[in-house]
Image: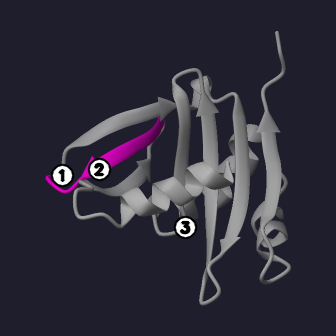
Amino acid sequence: MKQRLYQKFVQLFSRQNDVTDYLINQAGIVRKRNDDIETQVFCWSEVTKIEVCKLDFFSYDEVALQFTTPEGCFEILEKHTAFEQLKIFLPEQYNVPLTWFSTVVENPFEYNYALLYQKNAE
């Protein structure tokens, strides 16, 4: 997960990136592009795993949520609009502990990781 997150940061800060934000809607997560076109990234019902980690970049920390679906993995970063909404939404939708965010940001200068949700095999 750590390597994929670093690659995502490189993509986010490249000039070729056309994604400006990720938003939350009733169905799931939506990608909003520079041209204001919104596309559904994944639906809540498709999520099989949710992980969170904090990466320390010495001058600042970045918390990232990773959602795993059958279609792949998707990261939502603190800078995205959806992230603040997810702090409240995850405990309601997936029974994630209310303290998930404060737990992962503890311990400065450390890589903190937590598995927040794992769908039961049916």
Q: CA distance from mark 3 to mark 2?
A: 16 Å
Q: Residue at x 83, y 15 (%)?
A: 121
Q: Residue at x 83, y 64 (%)?
A: 99
| Circle 1 crowding by C-alpha within 10 Å: few under 14, some 14–19, many from 20 | few
How was this image coloured?
Answer: one colour
| Circle 3 crowding by C-alpha within 10 Å: few under 14, some 14–19, many from 20 | some
Q: Earlier in the sequence, mark 3 or mark 1?
A: 1
Q: Is residue 57 above or below residue 66?
A: below
Q: Which element is circle 2 on?
A: strand
> Magenta segment, which residues?
28-35
User: Within the image, what quadrant is residue 100 found in?
Assistant: bottom right
Residue that mark 2 sits on? 32
Is 77 a magenta residue? no
Residue that mark 1 sits on? 36
In percent of width and height, residue 83 lies at 55, 60
Which residue reaches farthest top?
122
Query: 102 left or right of 79?
Result: right
Magenta stretch: dominant SS? strand
Residue that mark 3 sits on? 78
Give yes or no for contact between labels 1 and 2 (Cβ–Cβ under 8 Å): yes
In percent of width and height, residue 119 lies at 78, 26
